[in-house]
Image (spheres, helix red, strand yellow):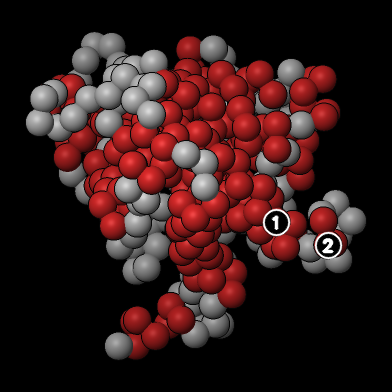
Amino acid sequence: MKRILQHFIPGIARPDPGRRNTKGEWRPDYPCAYAPVFVWPPRPLAFLKWLVTWPGFMWPRNLVLLAISAASWFWFQPELSRCAQFQWEWISQLFLRNQVLIWLVYGSYHLYFYILKGEGTKGKYDPRWPARNSRTFLFRDQVYDNIFWTAGVGCALMTAYEVVTMWLYANGKLPYVSWSTHPVWFVVWMFLIPFWREFHFYWIHRLIHWKPLYQRVHYLHHKNINPISWSGMAMHPVETFLYFSVVLIHWVVPSHPLHFIFNLQHTGLSPACGHHGFEGPILDDKWPTGSYFHYLHHRYFECNYGEAGIPLDKWFGTFRDGTPDGEGSKLREKH
Ligand SMILES: [Zn+2]
Ligand SMILES: [Zn+2]
């Protein structure tokens, strides 16, 4: 009981065992590493282990997100027949459901890390807490600013993509596959979606780091040098629009609406884990979460545009492993 309580009572969290540099920045002892997928020579055993063991590709991240998508589709999705015409009734139902999901995921991480301070500063990359009274942010407050962009604009655009796609499905205008007619493709496509997301994200991200777009669009996300979970979708609407365009693949590749929802919710919910600013595992070392890989992008800007699955950054010379003299340590620091 004491072990559970210590997570929920501020100030008595365990001491920080990590290493901090002179600026107080927490660093893991190990370099950022890629998943053993695109490696030569192939490592089939390491790949299998990564695929099925905890924590790995399936557990917990992708299967939890798939479970959320399946619950959304089976229990909280308007009947497709209702979506054949644009009507506020089903559109507002989708918006409300997405709003609840965003608050549950982003809000839970924020509550645990930043309100209850359940981990204290253990594994907190940047020793500072969210910015208050800062002119950088809307309402002079990083948390309110980030909530506005993520739960407000982010959720609205996420829902807009869903509304148009459901309308297209309902009117029979999209290539459709069902579980009963194409079970193999159904599973294979579901498995490939996280990789498609990484590929799409890397290139969209490279695009918005092009100076004219960075200065007008992507600068907004990078106000968060010390990100929190709500920073995940704190983006300019143009960036959010490009970010969610990952789901347009379902307009051309035969898919079930569940593939679309998985892709959409994966895109809309996983940034919470990539931005909360703590190195997992948390909750007494039981829950793997956090992305030092993406934190390094917020800290140094010109590195780690993608994610830690497909080594696109490695192939294109933008990978930084985070150790003081490791790979990418000589990359430029400021944008
Ligand atoms: Zn980010
Ligand atoms: Zn960026």
The residue at 76%/45% (across/down) is 223
Residue 40 visible in the snapshot: yes
Q: Which mark is residue 139?
A: 2
Numbered label tally: 2
185 left or right, relative to 156: left
Residue 104 place in picture, x, y as percent: 46, 64
Residue 3 place in picture, x, y as percent: 34, 82
Q: Which residue is mark 1?
A: 148
The residue at 70%/31% (across/down) is 238
Q: Nearer the viewer, residue 239 or 157?
A: 157
Residue 335 place in picture, x, y as percent: 78, 28
186 above or below 14? above
| Disc 2 residue type (three-letter) | Phe
Residue 50 sits in quarter: top left
The residue at 47%/39% (across/down) is 85
Q: Nearer the viewer, residue 289 or 218?
A: 218
Residue 326 visible in the snapshot: no
Q: Rounded to the nearest whole Å, what is the CA distance between mark 2 and mark 1?
A: 10 Å
Residue 243 place in picture, x, y as percent: 57, 31
Q: Nearer the viewer, residue 295 or 26?
A: 295
The residue at 35%/51% (across/down) is 77
